[in-house]
Amino acid sequence: MDLEPELLLQEARENVEAAQSYRRELGHRLQGLQEARRQIKESASQTRDVLKQHFNDLKGTLGKLLDERLVTLLQEVDAIEQETIKPLDDCQKLIEHGVNTAEDLVQEGEIAILGGVGEQNEKLWNFTKKASHIQLDSLPEVPLLVDVPCLSAQLDDSILNIVKDHIFKHGTVASRPPVQIEELVEKPGGIIVRWCKVDDDFTAQDYRLQFRKCTSSHFEDVYVGSETEFIVLHIDPNVDYQFRVCARGDGRQEWSPWSVPQTGHSTLVPHEWTAGFEGYSLSSRRNIALRNDAESSGVLYSSAPTYFCGQTLTFRVETVGQPDRRDSLGVCAEKQNGYDSLQRDQAVCISTNGAVFVNGKEMTNQLPAVTSGSTVTFDIEAVTLGSTNNNEGGNFKLRVTISSNNREVVFDWLLDQSCGSLYFGCSFFYPGWKVLVF
């Protein structure tokens, strides 16, 4: 059945817009495909260069045996490259065909629309019918860079010490690194980096994490160990950093190829202690406070209320001094001078002996005593606003979780008024205590 001219014209316009959107999306996918192709090409080229250089250095001693192995490995690189490039070629042809189809459809639709609704009804009808038979919402899947091969070579410079029978086992070509960065989580003044194995046949003994500013050409080591996450501190806010990780196989000395670098940044303002407070010495970034030998005049507070509900505030005790039951680590609604501890109203804290205080009252539940290396975390969420209809005082309720040494306490904290952000603080009566906050 013929459509009304106005409806036909409207549908034609909609189809042109859909075709234009389809063309744009295909362009984005074509760009992703080109990046994937470039990664394969560049890594294959780099791998060839590494293999050639390595084996050329050994040729004078090992001669023909090394030449035979080199040919084998280069053929393996070629085979992986050709095998993995072919699906990208097929996908590119599909995208290019779609682009041509979309361009033809846009041109035909624009011509039909320029004709108006008079004598051009047949053109509009033919165009609409043609457009309805083309799947303008069907887009090919383009792989992410981490999902396509990134060729590299694993080589051992001690080959000169290996006998003839070992030569034919020397060197491998990896199409993908065995580990990849899984997640980057911003923290005040830091970024938590999490990674995981992507090769089930690879048994990792250690991991090695590096980072750099995106403006730098040099990566630097920041962690080596068996954990699969690490918080990188001393991160400047709103500055892009790149992270990469590799692994060392069980019983091996050499490191695996690097993961595909991931870029991240933190928008959160770093936590800082108040500078110039008697009794405490601060690091250059003001995130580490050391209780010195000078007489303290009370609680060392943060320079600003930089803790917000929903975040995790972490204190890490680097060194310890003599404990005192009046010591405190915690958060408060506002700075109050004249107190020698956070064991007061409008504050929650933990003492170095593990006692927990809420608005100055000690809780029945207690955490383990704080020791060197202890990490104390505060997680706070808003529960209710307005009147709480109770006799405990306060009209704003926060749910607080304090964790330390694999134990935690959870309780409600009542404040006189709502607080968009909170201060943190510490107090120690004896020198030697050093605390990092992030």
Image (tube, rainbow, N blue to C red):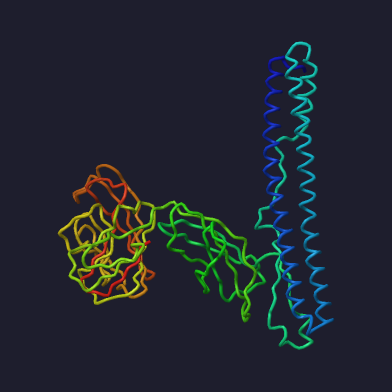
Percent position (x, y) of residue 358? 24, 59
Q: Between 196 and 30, which is closer to the camera in this rendering?
A: 30
In the displayed structure image, the side of residue 72 where residue 399 appears, left or right = left
Q: Is residue 258 above or below residue 34?
A: below
In the displayed structure image, the side of residue 407 where residue 261 appears, left or right = right
**Which image quarter: residue 208?**
bottom right
Percent position (x, y) of residue 89? 79, 50
Quadrant in which the N terminus appears = top right
Percent position (x, y) of residue 281? 28, 68
In the displayed structure image, the side of residue 31 where residue 241 appears, left or right = left
Percent position (x, y) of residue 302? 29, 58
In the displayed structure image, the side of residue 415 where residue 191 appears, left or right = right
Q: Between 112 and 284, which is closer to the camera in this rendering?
A: 284
Quadrant in which the C terminus appears = bottom left
Q: Between 84 and 62, which is closer to the camera in this rendering?
A: 62
Residue at the location (80% across, 17% down)? 122
**Which image quarter: residue 234?**
bottom left
